[in-house]
Structures are given as C-alpha cells and as structure tokens.
Image: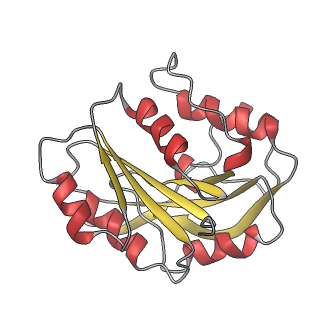
C-alpha cells in the first residue's frame, strides 16, 4: 500500500473538551491523502472514545503512558508513514477545509519544509486576529533568531529530515526541533498569506 502524503499527528491527554474541534477540521479537508494518528497519554476522560467516534476513517489511535508532550511527539514520528509530518494537537484546527490541499499543492515541488500563517481563535472558535509573529516569505534557521516566526502547527516537515524532539528541553523542544529541521533542509516553501491553522 502506498504511503500517504501527510501524517497528521494529534497529541492528546484528557482532551475531551477540545478534541472534537481538531477532528472535525481533519474530517472536513478536501485533500484526503493523509493518515491521522492520535497519540494519547493514557487519558482518564472520554478522549479515546471521542477519537473513535468522531475521527476519520482509518484513524490510528495509540493510548499509553508517556513522559510528556515531546515524548508523545517522538512516538508519533516513529509511527508515522507519511512523506510529510503535521503536528495538529488537541484543540488545534485547520483554518479552512482546503488547508491540506494548499499544502499538497506545495508538496508537488518536494520542498523539505512547507509552512504558512496562523490565525488566533477564542474559546468559541471565533477568529480574533492573526498571530503577532508573521511567517516570512523565505524561512531559514536564522529566521528563528527573531522568535518562533512560524507556529509549530503550521510548520510541515518532510519525514526524511526530521529529528526526534530533545526531551532535555522541557518547554522549548518544539522551537529547538524546528531549528534543527531548518538546518537540515535544502528548500522550503511558504503557502502564502491566508492562514493554514486557526
């Protein structure tokens, strides 16, 4: 069976209150060339049941204790089979039903990293504005000297170049991981000003 273009990896832990938003945004995507992995940290609420009921057909759910968010992300990397990895964690959502299609169109040229903009939403999923840091037209490792210009969820990396997360960084392993991805990348592609995530 041919590997999917994208592996959408969703990390969860007691996320019953917010997971449906994420799952619905995945189900609504016009591009269907993906697998969806739920990496759950042995939730004690209805997270896993909701993932089974609301998830996409063929969703892969793994629920077991972990050592925190970044350990769970490493488990997602190890289990992913897609060409590109997207970390869309519980409570995160694609901005529109065509977000994945925009990423797929950019993937035709086989860049190492595809990235875009992020909009902010409130608890009712109402858009309150764009993220205060804007993804640049050209992204390099040096770009991150100015802060995390690209939101982690809008940073899509080719699986062949991704390292694992360094668990010695308790709060900034995602920032450090993005920099290492950029150091390994040869060519990156921005999908434009319209938000990917929101």
For residue 154, side relative to residue 198 (left or right): right
Foreground residue among 14 and 150: 14
Tell me the quarter of the image containing the C terminus.
Answer: bottom left
Quarter of the image containing the N terminus? bottom right
- Vertical position of residue 172 compared to residue 51: above or below: above
Q: Is residue 102 left or right of residue 138?
A: left
Q: Is residue 96 above or below residue 161?
A: below
Residue 101 at x, y = what percent?
Answer: 61, 78
Relative to 10, is 144 on the left or the right? Answer: right
Q: Residue at x 23, y 64 (%)?
A: 52
From this viewpoint, which residue is outermost toward the left?
Answer: 45
Where is residue 14 shown, x and y percent of the image? 20, 44
Number of callouts: 0
Examine the image and state in which quarter residue 16 appears.
bottom left
Residue at 54% over, 28% down: 173
- Spot the residue most to the top: 168
- Say how the picture is coloured: secondary structure
Residue 49 seen by the camera: yes
Residue 18: x and y in percent read 25, 57
* Residue 21 screen position, x and y as percent: 30, 66
Residue 160 drawn above or below residue 18: above
Task: Report the residue that reaches farthest toward the front.
Answer: 1
Instruction: Indicate whether 76 appears above or below 135.
Output: above
Question: Residue extending furthest bottom?
Answer: 30
99 vs 140, left or right, is left
Is residue 123 something that shows in the picture? no
Q: Residue at x 68, y 53 (%)?
A: 135
């Amino acid at each position: 069976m041919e590997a999917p273009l994208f592996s959408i990896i969703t990390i969860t832990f007691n996320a019953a209150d917010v997971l449906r938003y994420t799952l619905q945004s995945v189900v609504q995507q016009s591009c269907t060339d993906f697998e969806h992995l739920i990496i759950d940290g042995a939730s004690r609420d209805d997270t896993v049941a909701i993932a089974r009921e609301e998830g996409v057909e063929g969703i892969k759910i793994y629920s077991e204790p972990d050592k925190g968010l970044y350990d769970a992300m490493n488990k997602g990397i190890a289990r992913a089979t897609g060409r590109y990895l997207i970390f869309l964690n519980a409570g995160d959502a694609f901005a529109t039903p065509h977000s994945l299609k925009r990423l797929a169109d950019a993937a035709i040229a086989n860049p190492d990293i595809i990235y875009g903009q992020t909009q902010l939403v409130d608890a009712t999923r109402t858009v309150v504005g764009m993220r205060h840091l804007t993804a640049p037209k050209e992204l390099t490792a040096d770009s991150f000297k100015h802060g995390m210009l690209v939101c982690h969820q809008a940073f899509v990396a080719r699986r062949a170049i991704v390292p694992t997360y360094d668990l010695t960084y308790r709060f900034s392993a995602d920032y450090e991981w993005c920099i290492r991805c950029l150091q390994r990348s040869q060519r990156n592609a921005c999908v434009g000003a319209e938000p990917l995530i929101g």
